[in-house]
Amino acid sequence: MTDPLNLERQVCFALAVASRSVIGVYRPLLQPLGLTHPQYLVMLALWQHAPLSVKELSKLLQLDPGTLSPLLKRLEASGYIRRGRDSRDERVLEVTLTPEGWKLRSEAEGIPSSVVDRLGMGLEELQELHQSLTRVIAAANGAHH
């Protein structure tokens, strides 16, 4: 009989190691852009949806504002984003991209295909994995409530 606590059989172990390993593949690709992986995720969200309130960004990235805030500070210091009060509602802190932030997008366009090349896995397999992981995230979020 197999031990239910066998480390190699734990989903959490496989996910943690896969996450670290895949982020490691991104690291050398993001270095020339001066971005960490968490900062890259913020930029992806902004390139797709900017401007966004901090609250919207926090929800999109599934990051609490306390974790997001230092990422935004660093990106602002790098000149990629600007944080300011929303002109329509002073209580809302809005995040916008600077011209440098928009320019960075074209430099980042090659990253997804480089990651796929470096992983050496088929696009179809990666898309299936993404769908499975999306279901795992939804199930885990459902289990929290």
Image (cartoon, rainbow, N blue to C red):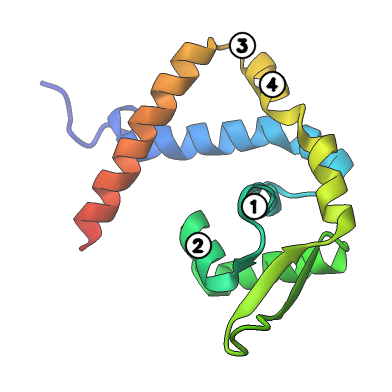
Nearer mark to the viewer, of 1 and 4: 4
Element assignment for label 4: helix
Amino acid marked by disc 2: Leu
Q: Which mark is residue 63?
A: 2
Badge 4 density bin: few <14, some 14–19, many ≥20, Cα 10 Å: few
Real-space CA distance between mark 3 and mark 1, rounded to the nearest whole angstrom = 23 Å
Real-space CA distance between mark 2 and mark 1, rounded to the nearest whole angstrom = 10 Å
Tags 4 and 3 touching, CB below 8 Å: no
Real-space CA distance between mark 4 and mark 3, rounded to the nearest whole angstrom = 11 Å
Badge 2 density bin: few <14, some 14–19, many ≥20, Cα 10 Å: some
Residue at horizontal 64%, vertical 72%? 69
At which x and y percent is residue 18?
A: 50, 32
Residue at horizontal 57%, vertical 89%? 91
Badge 3 density bin: few <14, some 14–19, many ≥20, Cα 10 Å: few
Q: Which mark sits nearer the N-terminus, 1 or 4?
A: 1
Reading the image, the residue beneath label 3 is 120
Residue 34 visible in the current orientation: no
Residue at horizontal 38%, vertical 34%? 133
Amino acid marked by disc 3: Gly
Residue 107 visible in the current orientation: yes
At which x and y percent is residue 67?
A: 57, 68
At which x and y percent is residue 53?
A: 59, 71
Real-space CA distance between mark 1 and mark 4, rounded to the nearest whole angstrom = 19 Å
Tags 2 and 1 touching, CB below 8 Å: yes
Reading the image, the residue beneath label 1 is 38
Q: Quadrant of the C terminus?
A: bottom left
